[in-house]
Image (cartoon, helix red, strand yellow):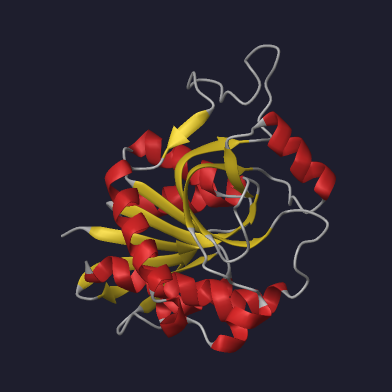
């Protein structure tokens, strides 16, 4: 029987997913808690990714080697970079790139040594399913979020975007950093800290990966200050609705 890994970047998001699992039990491996159980009758294991690329790669490897997962679905938050990628929007990744990878002049900037590429793909079929689930969720936004949250974060017709997501071991939260990334990598939609690591491990093992990121800010000086509330009232509810919808398909 197949098994799906459900990975979240932050605890509130994972808690929302765990609430959907009726019979999970927790196991501790390598300092991480893995919740093993079922969701809509399907075998799943849920875990926090850890922050940054090294922690994320370790988690991805454990999921594949120890728990034998057949696919990985990652939900998290990110800073928006692309034009029109606004707070409350969701980004489903098509590709990932490490914006802080630089082995030049031996290799071209951003290229990962040994792979001959700077980008790693998400699984197309699984990402298509995830994107459709996101579209359905956004179309019924009022049923998932309270009116206070919609008003507080000015969530006016949130949209789905698909494309390149950047990862790096640096929290991007200034206008100068954000604009530098936009100039250097104009196709990038969002920036976070784990996706490219998961994508590289999944490529090594041939395991399908799909990642959705809720945009919490624009990764600049104007980043929203009430992040805990956004995580609690928006991002975690998005994650629960998306994961639940994916397993109902």
- Looking at the image, which residue sits at the far top? 106
Numbered-mark total: 0
From the top left corner, tell me how far across and down residue 103 is, in percent. Answer: 67, 21
Tell me what residue is drawn at x 27 percent, y 74 percent: 38
From the top left corner, tell me how far across and down residue 32 is, in percent. Answer: 52, 64
Would you say 211 lies left or right of 155 here? Answer: left
- Looking at the image, which residue sits at the far front? 156
Along the line of sight, the residue nearer the viewer: 38 or 224? 224
Dividing the image into 4 quarters, which one contains the N terminus?
bottom left
- Asked if residue 216 can be seen in this view, the reply is yes
- Looking at the image, which residue sits at the far left? 1
Would you say 166 lies left or right of 36 here? Answer: right
Tell me what residue is drawn at x 44 percent, y 53 percent: 211
Q: Is residue 219 above or below residue 248?
A: above
Residue 77's quadrant in the figure? Answer: bottom right
Tell me what residue is drawn at x 58 percent, y 68 percent: 10
Q: Is residue 236 above or below residue 118?
A: below
From the top left corner, tell me how far across and down residue 175 is, in percent. Answer: 82, 48
- Asked if residue 66 can be seen in this view, the reply is no
Tell me what residue is drawn at x 27 percent, y 46 percent: 125
Dividing the image into 4 quarters, which one contains the C terminus?
bottom left
Q: Is residue 60 above or below residue 120?
A: below
């Amino acid at each position: 029987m197949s098994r799906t890994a459900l990975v979240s970047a932050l605890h509130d998001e994972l808690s929302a997913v765990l609430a959907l699992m009726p019979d999970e039990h927790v196991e501790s491996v390598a300092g991480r808690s893995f919740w093993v159980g079922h969701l809509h009758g399907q075998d799943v294991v849920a875990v926090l990714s850890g922050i940054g690329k090294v922690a994320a790669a370790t988690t991805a490897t454990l999921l594949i080697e120890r728990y034998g997962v057949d696919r990985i679905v990652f939900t998290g938050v990110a800073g928006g970079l692309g034009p029109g990628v606004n707070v409350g929007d969701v980004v489903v990744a098509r590709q990932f790139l490490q914006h802080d990878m630089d082995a030049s002049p031996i290799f071209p900037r951003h290229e990962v040594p040994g792979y001959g590429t700077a980008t790693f793909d998400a699984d197309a079929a699984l990402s298509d399913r995830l994107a459709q689930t996101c579209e359905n969720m956004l179309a019924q936004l009022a049923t998932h979020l309270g009116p206070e949250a919609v008003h507080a974060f000015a969530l006016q017709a949130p949209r789905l975007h698909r494309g390149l997501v950047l990862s790096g071991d640096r929290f991007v939260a200034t206008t100068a950093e954000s604009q530098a990334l936009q100039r250097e990598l104009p196709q990038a939609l969002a920036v976070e800290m784990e996706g490219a690591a998961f994508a590289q491990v999944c490529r090594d093992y041939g395991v399908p990966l799909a990642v959705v990121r809720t945009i919490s800010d624009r990764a600049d000086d104007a980043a929203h200050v009430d992040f805990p509330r956004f995580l609690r009232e928006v991002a975690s509810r998005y994650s629960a609705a998306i994961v639940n919808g994916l397993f109902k398909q």
